[in-house]
Amino acid sequence: MKLKQDFFEQLDGFYQQVLPTPLPAPHWLLWSDDAAALIGLQQPNDELLQVFSGNQRHAEAQYYAQVYSGHQFGGYSPQLGDGRSIILGEAVGPHGSWDVALKGAGPTPFSRRGDGRAVTRSAVREFLVSEALAALNIPTTRALAVIGSELPVWRETLEKGATTVRLARSHIRFGHFEHSFYAFDGEQQTDRVKRLADFVITQHFPQFSCDRAGYKAWFTKVVQLTARLIAKWQAFGFAHGVMNTDNMSILGDSFDFGPFAFLDTFQENFICNHSDPDGRYAYGQQPGVGLWNLRCLAQALTPLLSSDDLVDGLRAYQPALVAEYVELMAGRLGFAPQLDDSHAMDFDLQLIGGFTQLLEQQRLDYTNTLRQFGAIAATENATALRDEFVDTHAFDGWWQHYCDRVGRVDDIGSWQQARRLASPKYILRNYQAQQATEQALAGDLSGLQTLQQLLQKPFDEQPELAHYAARPPQWGEGLIMSCSS
């Protein structure tokens, strides 16, 4: 694994060096061949195990924890930083460079009296959701591996410690800019914000210049990338759970997974985090929170851009989010979106919204119901789908509008296949992740390996695993999780 050190060499003052605390008696729990291919790695081996568990130093690694701040549940926290994640550097591979971080590698200067460890439960969940999102073509950080141990770690109960090897195109968050803005003033503030913005542009947005015009174009692009990411979350029923600004990637990638969940039964105000009783980060609130977070970022960029420039950039949010969401949902439902016609888009939004309202009223499974569009004949009698609805009168009214919108379908086989390629059969259901993790802690990795296999091809039928697509049992419906890890 070849490493370079652009962040470390160019952004002195944005991190502190710290060595990982060795993980005793480490062993591989999970490994992603797809993630490994991004940085040119092949199979796991003992040398990598020792490096990633902190028991052996990598010759080219610098080992550092980044400093940042952020708005957490609406309130500003002046200094956060990597409290349990240590970055080795940027791995150079056939698909660009990716930060390599050890999550759960022990305390850092930003641990805030924490132990800096992660537990197997959270490490496994991050690995699985990274695989799941990537296979759904939703931008995300990746989990290369999970390393297990017998190290006792206390959370609500005594658990086993683990390390996630995380790959990220960048670990820079909205919170990096907020820290530079709020922790400094005068020339130092301007210099830090500018250095950080110039680094991000040079590394990841080379089409833009490092001047006012370039900063404005770059910020607008960040707004659009964030909007499109959240539109994808909404379209596939993904709830992040903790959309603090320190969990928002400057590249528009899904980042920092805690109490996430995919929807089982469709519920607009589904809360997946039991630390969020008021539902600030509920599934249906995510689009609004995304814009709120971008406004926080805009405030931190005022040393570089005027308020007019920043407001212009923020105006790109809603059009980008709506266009992406309508395009994805139209693909799932089977009609061609008219993205250049605002009136047509409004109609499509109403049609999509009418369908999700029916799903919520009838308490139907979001993923399974949409998957059925790959097996029905649009504009004809939809008996199989109709039978899912208790209120068939309401369904019939929606179905008529839907058929009018779809229009004529000449090749129903191709139409159905397109629906199956747009709507996954399998998602990561919380109860399945919990069951597989419990098996792994008891020494049986087969459940995790099956889930990984399943989630890598969510659009395929995989008939031997079809039972994984069933609705959860009553005890597993809509499980919520804690932030502890």
Image: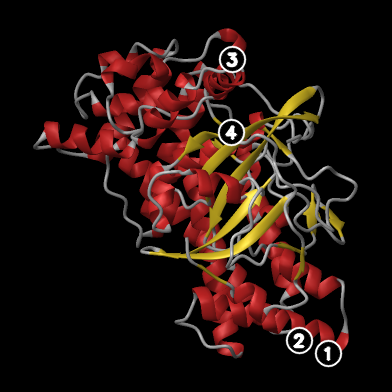
Left or right: where does residue 146 sit relative to residue 117? left
In the rendering, at what x and y percent does residue 429 appear? 52, 25
* Residue 485 versus residue 5 in the image, above or below: above
SS for callout 4: helix
Figure quadrant of residue 23: top right
Q: Residue at x 54, y 66 (%)?
A: 90
Q: What residue does disc 1 label? A: 187
Assess whether mark 4 and mark 3 are in contact (beta carbons under 8 angstroms).
Answer: no
What whole-number distance in Å separates the C-alpha atoms at marks 1 and 3? 54 Å
Q: Earlier in the sequence, mark 3 or mark 4?
A: 4
In the rendering, at what x and y percent does residue 145 appear? 52, 42
Category of crowding for the residue at label 1, using alpha-carbon neighbours closer than 10 angstroms: few (below 14), some (14–19), many (at least 20): few
SS for callout 3: helix
Q: Give amino acid for label 2.
A: Asp
Location of the C terminus by quadrant is top right
* Residue 317 versus residue 20 in the image, above or below: below
Assess whether mark 1 and mark 2 are in contact (beta carbons under 8 angstroms).
Answer: yes
What whole-number distance in Å separates the C-alpha atoms at marks 2 and 3? 51 Å
Q: What residue does disc 4 label? A: 125
